Image (cartoon, helix red, strand yellow):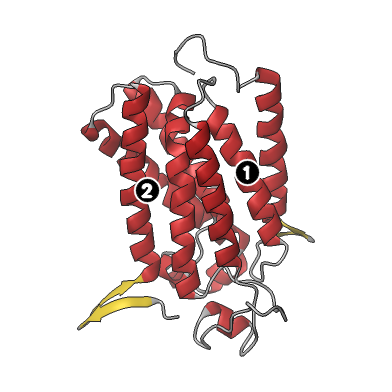
Amino acid sequence: MHPIFIRIGPLEIRYYGLMYLVAFVVGFFLMRAEVRRRGLGLSTEDLLDIFLVTIPLGLLGARIYYVLFRLDFFLRHPAEIPAIWHGGLAIHGGLLGGALGLWIAARLKKLSFWELADCTVPAVILGQALGRIGNLMNGDAYGLPTSLPWGIVFPPDSPAGQAFPGTPLHPTMIYEILGNLMIFGLLWWLRMRPAKPGFLTAVYFMGYSVVRGLVSIVRGDSLWLGPIRAAHVASLLLFFGFGIWLLRARLWEPSRERGLS
């Protein structure tokens, strides 16, 4: 495993950036197909506008979240703050930033936020799976040491190799790729259900909370809130928050009307 996909003279293309680019492109076409299927009346230009709002805010939120949890390090090394190619994009921060961008876009386009979110979450979870390929090649988002036969020894110059040199580690990136692909398959199947706006979004957040909560048990580079992994706190809040809403609003039932939310 090596973080650089190709090098041409001084130009480097890294897997980390490449997989994010692939995720954005695939996500765009998935979202376009779903928007058209639901008849939301968005053109390709409208979708590009939405992406131009949500993606930068998502990346910004992901980086700010990560930096805040490791503020001592970044205060000592401020030049590392923009160096996202070294890793350090926290998904929960990205979801917060992306949700803000999507809300802004929904208002600008005069759409229901939850309908737009339902069109987006299948692309988001597939993008997360693709992004973890970049983490795997980069050697970040790594696991704890393991004696299991599928443990991976990462290169010594990778974040995982520096933290646990010469030690087999849980391939947490692969665990999450598999879990995210399962959620994608579930969402892609459920999207045909004539449910209320927000149904797919609730299923996404609940499903991903379970996957991330389980994977984080063996993560070796977790962000912490005191003695508790931050991912566990976020996963619990999202799972129960969206779970309560799903049940109380009976989101699985057919929607009777479309409107702004």
Above-or-below relation of 109 to 121: above
Q: Which residue is most to the right?
A: 227
Q: Position of residue 19 (x, y in %)?
A: 38, 62
Q: In which quarter of the image is residue 175?
A: bottom right
Which residue is pictured at 68% across the width and 47% down the height? 235
The secondary structure type at the circle numbered 1 is helix
Q: Residue 207 carries which label?
A: 1
Q: Which mark is residue 56?
A: 2
Q: In which quarter of the image is residue 131?
A: bottom left
Q: What element carries label 2?
A: helix
Can residue 244 be seen? yes
Quadrant housing the N terminus: bottom left
Q: From mark 1 to mark 2, how far is it between C-alphas?
A: 25 Å
Neighbour tally class for label 1: few under 14, some 14-19, many 20 plus, Cα within 10 Å = many
Say if 69 sits above or below 195 in the image.
below
- Residue 35 drawn at (x, y percent): 35, 29
Residue 6, image x and y in percent? 28, 77
Judged left or right of residue 232, residue 258 is: left
Q: 82 or 205, which lies in front? A: 205
Disc 1 or disc 2, which is closer to the eye?
A: 1
Is 30 situated above or below 131? above
Image location (x, y in percent) of residue 27 = 36, 46
Mark nearer the N terminus (1 vs 2): 2
Question: Mark 1 belongs to which amino acid?
Answer: Gly
Q: Identity of the amino acid at label 2?
A: Pro
Q: Which of 77 and 63 is in front in this view?
A: 63
Q: Residue at x 61, y 90 (%)?
A: 166
